[in-house]
Amino acid sequence: MTILAYDGFGASIGDKALVRDVSFSIARGEITAVIGASGSGKTMSALTPFGLSHAESSGSVRLMEEELVGRDEAELARLRSQYVGFVFQQPLAALTAHMTIADHLREAAMQAGGSKPDMPALQALLTEVELDDPVFLQRYPHQLSGGQRQRVMIACALAHSPQLLVADEPTSALDAPLRGAILALLAQLARKRNMGLLLVSHDIAKLRDIADNLVVMQSGALVESGPASQLLSEPQSEHARALFAAVPRISDQPPQRSHIADIRTESGPLLAVNGLCVDFSGNGFLKPKNRVVHDVDLTIAHGESVALVGGSGSGKSTIAKAISGLGPVSDGEICLRSHSLGKRRGRQELLAIQPVFQDPLASLDPRWTVYDIVAEPLVHLRKDIDAALRLLRVESLLDSVGLDADFANRKPPQLSGGQAQRVAIARALAVEPDLLVLDEATSALDPIVADQIVTLLEALRRDQGLSLLFITHDIALAWRLCHRIVVLDNGKVAEDASADVLIKKPKAAASKRLVAAC
């Protein structure tokens, strides 16, 4: 039985067509994955027919033989609550902070007019998504890890026994083992409950194991579709081939990395972290502090690229913030060119280490032009540069990250994810730093754009002599870019080795898990 059928579907805002002539169907128990570059129309195609975007639908989309296109919001709400469960990209944003997990599940189960479920029924939902401990029912979203929150979102989506599950990038913020586990769980639930599953994903490497069919989109159009195994093995479209080629794999030939001299030179490393510890305050009066980073040692040479890799909650971002001067240091020492960086860093010390964040659009002021964003450090820190020289400098910086000069007049909402990340990198380069600290700088990007950003970073490191600290949960991506990989586990260094050695012969259990998950 066909659960969902697209026939010539289109989506537009005003006179601008964003998606056009999309056709495919999903049968009961079938898993269809929609893939494509950022801005290709994947999410808009998945959500617009259900009234969950600002776009207007055209063509036809039938859910359980009922037409969705042309329905008013009240009718769409009825059909959503009766037939469809949704799993969104950011579970923390989708869950309500002041509600317990039990409250979330109870509300979700009753949305279609169902009776109020008792606690055993709620626990059964959590058990189905592999959260067996009853204590989870009394917790709040902020008390859960990223993977646990996503499992709760899936349980909420299942609570009213839908016929169709729509999952929009449900794994983009998770580490490799968790990504595989969540996708496997979604596939298992779809088979067990005989539901249709519409999956929007950048995680192409995992789709071979779970998807029945693939739909490839580019610039709002469907360019190729078919059985997943066939399409992944023999893609016919140029865009599909480019997508698959951009996915980093540890099975590929080793990347050509420039030689890095021994960091134990006479001048010493650029950055040395010795015995770093970070504590977070306990909840409530007189509650003990919680140590999240334990005695971490780390060195980065001039011109070296080092990856900090680990699962969610392993301490990667906490260490990155401490090194950048944006987070606490409870004990230990951070040295730049053999000089200890105290709690109050001087201007030159702050400029030498520049961060680049995970979500570029969230870190750029939406009211400013790209020129204002990139020029801001020059305005405040280089009083000797007049307006004309600043403009030339901004144009040069944009050129160095692969953007034309006319981007200077755009604002962040007018940029794609990859363009926004290039602007963030240009801003960080404006003060001529020695070290870029990149905290999950590619995790929100599609494989093609992520590959472009990694290529850009390698060129900047090579041409400008930059050092890079690359924080990521993707060890294949770290192997693609970095000379050394430092694996974290529960706030401690589990292994520190050259990229080639660690990928070929991982020693620590945490390293073996990460390599096996690729």
Image (spheres, rainbow, N blue to C red):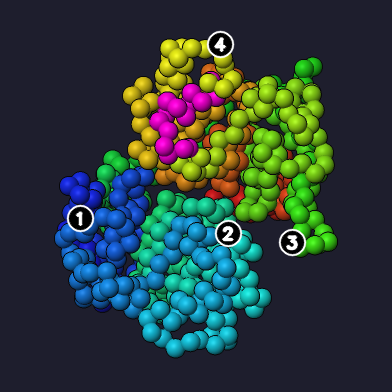
- Residue at the (73%, 29%) spot, across then down: 345
**Image marks 4 and 3: residues in contact by CB distance under 8 Å:** no
Q: Name the mark nearer the viewer: 4 or 2.
A: 4
| Residue on which the image places disc 2 | 146
Q: Which residues are magenta?
A: 364-378
> Rounded to the nearest whole Å, what is the CA distance between mark 4 and mark 1?
53 Å
Q: Where residue 306 sits: x, y (%)?
A: 64, 34
Q: Earlier in the sequence, mark 3 or mark 2?
A: 2
Which image quadrant for residue 266? top right
- The disc labelled 3 sits on which kind of residue? Asn
Q: Earlier in the sequence, mark 1 or mark 2?
A: 1
Secondary structure, magenta segment, majority class: helix
Which image quadrant: the N terminus?
A: bottom left
| Residue on which the image places disc 4 | 384
| Residue on which the image places disc 3 | 283
Q: Name the mark nearer the viewer: 3 or 1.
A: 3
Q: Earlier in the sequence, mark 4 or mark 1?
A: 1
Q: Secondary structure at mark 1?
A: strand
> Rounded to the nearest whole Å, what is the CA distance between mark 4 and mark 3?
48 Å
- Residue 33 versus residue 412 in the image, above or below: below
- The disc labelled 2 sits on which kind of residue? Gly
- Residue at the (58%, 81%) spot, across then down: 123
Q: Name the mark nearer the viewer: 4 or 3.
A: 4
- The disc labelled 1 sits on which kind of residue? Gly
- The disc labelled 4 sits on which kind of residue? Asp
Using the rendered image of the protein, determine whether residue 249 is visible from the camera's viewpoint.
Answer: no
